[in-house]
Amino acid sequence: MRKFSILFLGILMALLTLENCKPDVPDAPPGKPESDSLYIGTTYTIAKPFRFSNINNTYADSLTYEGVELGRRLFYDKHLSSTGQLSCASCHKSEFAFSDAGHAKSTNVFGPTKRNAPSVQNLLWAPKIFWDGRSATLGEQAKDAFHGEQDLNVPNAIQYLEADSEYVRLFKKAFGRPGDITEEHIYLAIQQFGMTLISSESHFDKVQRGQEQFTESEARGFQIFLTERGDCFHCHTHGNDLLMTDNIFHNNGLDSVNDVNDFTDKGRGEITGDINDYGKFKSPSLRNVALTAPYMHDGRYQTLEQVINFYSDSIKLSPTVDAIMLKANHANGGVHLTAQEKQDLLNLLYSMTDTSYTNNPAFQNPF
Ligand code: HEC
Ligand code: HEC
């Protein structure tokens, strides 16, 4: 009898779980009240990859599959621009780790963008977004991009979204009653999608997890990267984590400037107003960097070889240049790597390419 009731309970629980995972509930027929379940999305749980910092983001617990799916549609939807020609994905292409590879500057509805469109990945862990860190959340960032790049007309956008039954359904599921399509919900949905853009399956990761091995050259490259020889780790790692950025603002010595007011782009300083921040930019993650040329906030370098040559021999001085660039091992403009060391560092950077990220079907155009 006991066995039976345990079995019965088991079956009941299995059925209940199945019920919870049931896909979408159809809209109520005309004249009938809409079912409550129409307003309840399915929880989406983010798994923290190996050696990523703990998730410390207040929004990360409230993701739903429908919210993420909604965000993906909005990300790829060109109707959300004044020209009808531009979506987030126009400048953030999945095959290039969501950068606009091949373009130093992108073209928005007003003309060329001010800066290079960076790759987008693992921003759930970034306390500040954009080269100058002007947004604190991905939702704020989306608002900035919709207005700054796409010239979004909010009333028109809401009208368009309300006329699309799939959007109506997803907004209800993602945000619950009353399920209204609002400006804020547009940004929050993009934020949900943005949080799921996680890259953690490169050869580099697998080596760190003990599943694959570095080639000899990659292993040497990692040594250069992680030691005073190359000194890259100060800004492109953070503690023991594998984000490959410290998410902090630095002047890495791109320009020779005597007076901080002479920086063509004041970067972080434009936001804080502090002259000590002039010419500083957020360290980009080196993940997928082989896919995202050209490089730096203005796209000045066409190849990774040029970037490595810069760190090796061409660091320039200015009042806010990072103290690391002034260390003894950087005398005369850099750490002066040999041709072999440059090749090793390059191979290390290539090992951070994650094609399972760029090819992930969950991140592609849903239209
Ligand atoms: C016309 C091209 C263009 C469009 C359209 C565009 N972006 Fe961007 N994106 C950029 C540029 C350029 C930057 C760098 C701007 C800066 O940092 O000042 C950027 C930066 C970002 C970043 C910051 C990455 C980081 O590491 O800090 C994110 C995230 C992002 N965009 C997401 C979006 C989303 C979401 C949309 C749609 C709502 C969008 N972008 C639309 C060009 C574009
Ligand atoms: C003092 C901090 C610092 C150090 C040390 C440093 N970087 Fe950087 N790195 C940055 C910053 C900041 C940027 C962006 C600068 C900009 O665009 O103004 C950057 C940009 C890059 C880029 C371009 C990425 C992109 O998406 O545009 C690469 C590649 C790179 N660094 C690799 C390295 C390597 C390799 C080393 C070691 C030889 C190194 N960095 C050392 C801070 C640093």
Image: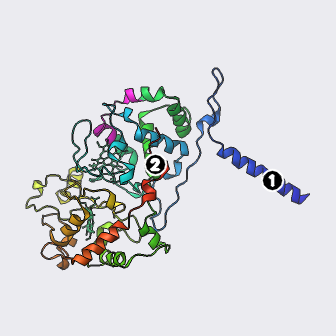
Which residue position is annotated with label 2?
Answer: 363
CA separation, marks 1 and 2? 38 Å
Q: Nearer the viewer, residue 24 or 301?
A: 301
| Ligand 1 is within 8 Å of the C-beta of the residue at disc 1 | no
The quadrant holding residue 229 is bottom left
Which residues lie in the magenta part? 145-157
Q: Position of residue 144 (x, y in %)?
A: 32, 42
Name the mark on residue 61.
none
Q: Residues within 10 Å of mark 1 (few under 14, many from 20)?
A: few
Residue 279 appears in the figure: yes
* Residue at point 86%, 55% (across, down): 5
Give the x, y percent position of residue 340: 25, 78
- Left or right: residue 29 versus residue 218 is right
Distance from mark 2 CB to nearest ligand 1 atom below 8 Å: no
Secondary structure mainly formed by the magenta segment: helix
At a point 65% along the width and 46% down the height, the residue shown is: 21
Indicate whether 49 appears above or below 64: below
The outermost residue toward the right is 1
Position of 123 with respect to 42 (left or right) is left
Q: Earlier in the sequence, mark 1 or mark 2?
A: 1
Q: Amino acid at mark 1?
A: Leu
Can the viewer see residue 323 in this picture? no
* Front-most of residues 114 and 278: 114
- What residue is shown with label 1? 9
**In the picture provided, is 163 more to the left or to the right than 338?**
right
Taking the spot 27% from the left edge, 78% from the top edge, the residue there is: 228
